[in-house]
Amino acid sequence: MQEYQAYRDQCSPSPATRIDLRELLVEAGLRSTTAILLAGFAYVAIRQWLADPTRFTLLLLVLAHCLTLGLSLFVRVPKKRDWNPVTVICSLGASYYFLAIQLAPGNHLVPEIFGAGLQAAGLAWQIYAKLTLRFSFGILPANRGIVSHGAYRFVRHPIYLGYVIADVGFLLTNFGLQNLLVCAGLYLLQYVRIYREEKLLSDDPEYRRYREKVRYRVLPGLY
């Protein structure tokens, strides 16, 4: 009987293994959902662009989200992430907010070319920051290793800075109440997301030293 019990204990998955399996299943579901939603959004946005090919901001919007979420489909799974329900809700809301954007033409507060220029600048900065990180980014806050070079010499969350620049460019050329509310809600979620990410990273002494060197989170001189 004791030998059977020992054999059964040896064959049964440990609690850690069961937790890892659940996380892998959640990860697979999250990535599959991301791919489906992104494909549907890109299809609708490109149809809107085909109706008016002068709306370069629509193409750049699709490119931005393909860069952000498309790359997240291939990043490595980190060892430690923040699974707090508030963090998960804010992270998913801030990642999939594009589903609430009004793609139909809005009011032009600035010329299309100016808004597209801001989007391109924001995209370029995002690419620079993500090249610095390589494959160490994702939807949920996690400790994927502390990076302090490249774009991370200027602010602690440079990718978010790129998001801000690109989103402002799109909003100024596609202005409307719905898009304004979407952007306001987005950056409320991003604020919580950054707070939770910093709380998780603050357990790492290397990050605390980095935080002392780089004072601002996203906007130099402001935040």
Image (cartoon, grey):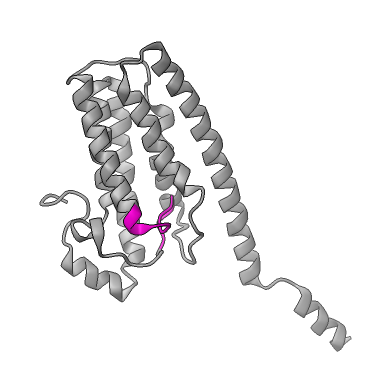
Residue at 32% x, 63% y: name it. 199
- Residue 165 visible from this viewpoint: yes
> Does residue 38 appear left or right of residue 97 in this picture?
right
Q: Position of residue 212 (x, y in %)?
A: 18, 69
**Image vertical order of residue 143 relative to residue 108, above or below:** below
Q: Quadrant of residue 68?
A: top left
Residue at 27% x, 19% y: name it. 176
The region drawn magenta spans 131-142
Residue at 89% x, 86% y: name it. 1
**Image vertical order of residue 5 relative to residue 96, above or below:** below
Q: Residue furthest left?
A: 221
Q: Quadrant of residue 196?
A: bottom left
Q: Quadrant of residue 152?
A: bottom left
Nearest the viewer among 9 and 107 is 107
Q: Position of residue 215 (x, y in %)?
A: 16, 61
Nearest the viewer among 190 and 115 is 115
Q: Residue furthest bottom?
A: 2
* Residue 86 counted in the magenta span: no
Residue at 76% x, 79% y: name it. 10
- Residue 191 visible from this viewpoint: no
